[in-house]
Amino acid sequence: AQSVTQLDSHVSVSEGTPVLLRCNYSSSYSPSLFWYVQHPNKGLQFLLKYTSAATLVKGINGFEAEFKKSETSFHLTKPSAHMSDAAEYFCVVSAASGSARQLTFGSGTQLTVLP
Amino acid sequence: GAGVSQTPSNKVTEKGKYVELRCDPISGHTALYWYRQSLGQGPEFLIYFQGTGAADDSGLPNDRFFAVRPEGSVSTLKIQRTERGDSAVYLCASSPPPTGHPLAGGANVLTFGAGSRLTVL
């Protein structure tokens, strides 16, 4: 069984300040972990993916995430928020078998960026 | 095409009617997935195709839901006797064929379409 918990349903930051979106996971196997972003009226877009090669993963648009097995966390960060980052972000876990059928999405975190 | 295309983008129907939602995946992507996203929630898995066959349909909520992919490309999600609770955004995604050992690179990255918003009155 696998699950993912996004700890904040809404996060609000000022433009130019750091972003932290929190995610904790539960998996019976070594997981693959993803972050996807969803802008209004657009499809979900892949941000980054963790497998096992490196615990710090860099994604698109300056986002990165760190896998911490001891904390079962995979938090998403960005040093400086832009207005264009305002969107909904989903943390996703997949079991080690690699089957996409086992992709489990979190409930999402809505990021607001204030001018 | 360049991305995953879904039609219609919006569909309003009456309770009890039949609905078809279409997905045109990225050319060459052998895997195709349907997800459903209700308001304020993350996407929930419905069904997964590898080629023409449904490799996993365990997420379909009941027998009113059915999906086909007869030629291994375009897929149609069919909903019979629609109910108000079926209202949601239906998302389609595709991914390329798996490469190497399944455990080597983890799950494939999915490319999602913009979704079909279904409203059942």
Image (tube, rainbow, N blue to C red):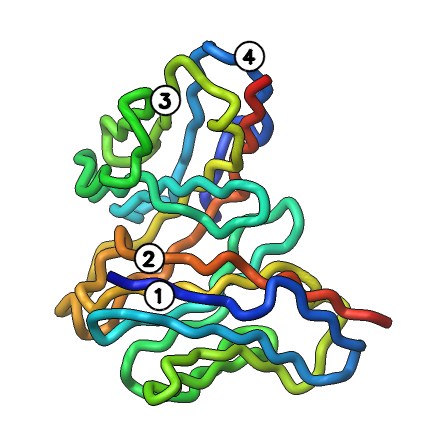
Binning the other alpha carbons within 10 Å of mark 4 as few (below 14), some (14 to 19) or many (20 upward) gives some
Total of numbered circles in the picture? 4
**What whole-number distance in Å separates the C-alpha atoms at marks 3 and 1?**
28 Å
* Residue nearer the viewer, A102 or A46: A102
Dot 2 corresponds to which residue? A103
As shown in the figure, which amino acid type bears the numbered disc 3? Lys
Instruction: Looking at this view, name the residue that lies furthest to the right.
Output: A115
Residue positioned 37% across, 40% down in the render = B34
* Quadrant of image for the N terminus of chain B: top left
Q: Which mark is residue B78?
A: 3
Which residue is tagged 1? A93
Amino acid type at image mark 4: Glu
Task: Tell me which residue sits at (54%, 70%) in the image.
Answer: A7
**Rendered image: mark on residue B14:** 4
Q: Label 3: chain?
A: B
Q: Do marks 4 and 2 both belong to one polypeptide chain?
A: no
The residue closer to the viewer here, A9 or B73, is: A9
